[in-house]
């Protein structure tokens, strides 16, 4: 049975959302969950649910990393945090994967240094899912594990992203693209020009450069870029959704007719919100570390946590890390 | 009287939108408009409107740059294009500003090489307006005139953006920020760390680093970044708006109740669309060239063209280029 080390103290709604997610996951997905954190707090939440016979265990951790802790300080000064303890469970073979909805930077740092990087991987990369107009998902990586990436690192991101996409979305030959500022190869910057030349040499289904708008058009599956660019793209998207949502709400409140209208179209809005909520897609994997690591959004609710556990379990079952190591070492051998 | 050279053949709806915009501008703004393009096509559109006594003239141009022309080829091979002729009118002192809703890359190239760069400016920068939650506007520059910018170029963008913001939005000390991937100064990349150090030394109201989400929160006025980043940010925002709009439409069509609801809340949606439509904000200036240049969105309608003319005229009246040259040469003198 796949065992997940779940950081029960990460996230804005911890440990409530984590406990809810763990129960859903244990019941629906047939995985064993180690709830890592402050035992009293976890037990209080567990007591609210019937859970007889479910494979749930508590593993104590004394410290908690907050959302405002700096990643490097959290890593160095809170060695007994729930994230550290959960990562050590994976490192020591007591769990197959780490799932956390905590401070993204801190969890990345903990995973990177407690678990280490796969031998052939230069830099791990964080892959975020973006729902698109074709009602499918495109992923972007890296969205913030690195800055100032080199072309050969972008190539590694593409290979890791391709393996991840195949594992989770079951597409045989995902369309891989490079995020740039125009489709013509000459248009990007120094990095994209060199990276494009490399990507053409891989065996990937590389379809060329795409622009920011293509992220949502569903014409490509895996989009690679430097982590600074990817993080700006992610945060800008979140910003637009937040802004439009707020504006729509204010506009609707402005008249009685539109309020009545809102009530009538409520189901449409619900569907809309659901499809723009990235937590439906189960968190972002940090690809390239020794041990599956999934980082959920801080706002994760129980369903988002369950989905993150589901993705973690699928990545374990499809032996994603073995495949990454295999393909990247083959690339390295070819020179 | 301020004279605007309007590229009548740029834009998806040219010359109809350009002629409509020219008539609105001539009537409402007290500016003189030179409509540059194919005389027959312009006259046909002009004949649809009463325009007795309005200061409108046609200046013939034989060639048209299309949206799919590559910027460098359009610049080199279509020397008699409406964009070229309009730029030469500004260069030769026959017009005060160039306005075009044509192929952004091509118009930038034409403006840059026909008009030239101001003596103290290293690289011109394109500044785009983003409506924010405080019902104000934040601008981002550069959004695509440059890639692989140097820290000293980012500093110049900040100074030019500050002058532009003061001229158009009448704010005395605009809050200037650097687009990065976290608020802490150490978090960005090599470029942002060096640029932040420089920005602190300027006399600007530099408030530090902001993330992508802050673009829409209205806590800063002028956001600077490398043009590759800015262009990705712009295209991603457009992509999200397009995606959400389409999703909302499909969701609403899915049931009769939501269709009735939609009719009732139509005014709210109209307001929403209007406020997310960047053409309300009058196009993007290419700051740093010798001669005011405004580039509108290809989709510009007549009102958007009028707004672009309005911004061009305001930048002329407030002597933005003199101020840019003055401040940048002072920076250069200080070393």
Image: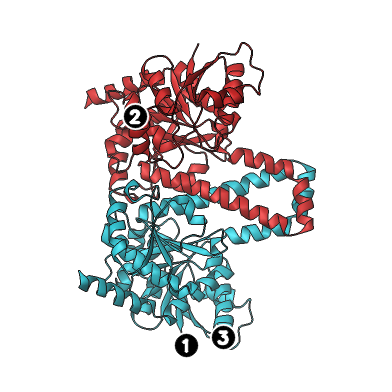
Chain colours: A red, B cyan
- Between residue B20 and residue B210, name the one nearer to us: B210
> Would you call the spot at circle 3 few (<14 residues within 10 Å), some (14-19), or many (20 or more)?
some
Label of residue A112 in the image: 2
Quadrant of the frame with the C terminus of chain B = bottom left
State which chain disc 2 sits on.
A
- The residue to which callout 3 is attached is B54
- Between residue B24 and residue A227, name the one nearer to us: A227
Mark 2 near mark 3, Cβ–Cβ under 8 Å? Answer: no
Residue B140 coordinates in the image, percent (x, y):
43, 60
- Between residue A204 and residue A162, name the one nearer to us: A162
- The residue at 27%/35% (across/down) is A152
Quarter of the view holding residue B125: bottom left
Label of residue A198 in the image: none
- Circle 1: element type: loop
Above/below status of A75 relative to B6: above
Residue A40 coordinates in the image, percent (x, y):
55, 24
Decide if residue B4 is on the left or right side of residue A204. Answer: right
From the viewer's perspective, is the residue at label 2 or at label 3 nearer? 2
- The residue to which callout 1 is attached is B1
């Amino acid at each position: 049975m796949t065992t997940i080390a779940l950081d029960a103290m990460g996230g804005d709604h911890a440990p409530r959302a984590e406990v809810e997610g763990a129960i859903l996951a244990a019941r629906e997905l047939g995985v064993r969950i180690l709830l890592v954190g402050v035992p009293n707090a976890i037990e209080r939440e567990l007591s609210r649910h019937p859970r007889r016979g479910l494979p749930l265990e508590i593993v104590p951790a004394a410290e908690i990393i907050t959302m405002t802790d700096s990643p490097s300080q959290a890593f160095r000064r809170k060695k007994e945090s729930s994230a550290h303890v959960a990562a050590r469970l994976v490192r020591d073979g007591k769990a197959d994967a780490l799932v956390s909805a905590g401070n993204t930077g801190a969890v990345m740092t903990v995973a990177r240094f407690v678990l280490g990087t796969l031998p052939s991987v230069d830099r791990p990369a964080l892959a975020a899912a973006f729902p698109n107009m074709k009602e499918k998902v495109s992923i972007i990586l890296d969205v913030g594990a690195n800055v100032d990436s080199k072309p050969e690192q972008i190539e590694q991101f593409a290979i890791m992203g391709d393996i991840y996409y195949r594992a989770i979305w079951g597409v045989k030959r995902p369309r891989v693209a490079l995020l740039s500022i125009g489709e013509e190869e000459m248009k990007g910057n120094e990095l994209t020009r060199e990276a494009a030349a490399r990507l053409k040499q891989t065996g990937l289904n590389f379809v060329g450069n795409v622009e920011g708008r293509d992220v949502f058009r569903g014409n490509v599956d895996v989009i690679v870029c430097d982590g600074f660019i990817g993080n700006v793209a992610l945060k800008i998207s979140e910003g637009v959704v937040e802004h439009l949502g707020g504006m729509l709400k204010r506009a609707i409140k402005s008249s009685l007719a539109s309020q009545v209208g809102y009530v009538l179209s409520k189901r449409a809005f619900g569907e809309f919100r659901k499809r723009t909520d990235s937590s439906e897609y189960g968190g972002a994997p940090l690809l390239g570390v020794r041990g599956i690591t999934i980082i959920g959004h801080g706002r994760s609710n129980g369903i988002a946590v369950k989905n993150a556990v589901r993705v973690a379990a699928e990545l374990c079952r499809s032996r994603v890390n073995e495949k990454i190591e295999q393909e990247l070492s083959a690339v390295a051998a070819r020179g």
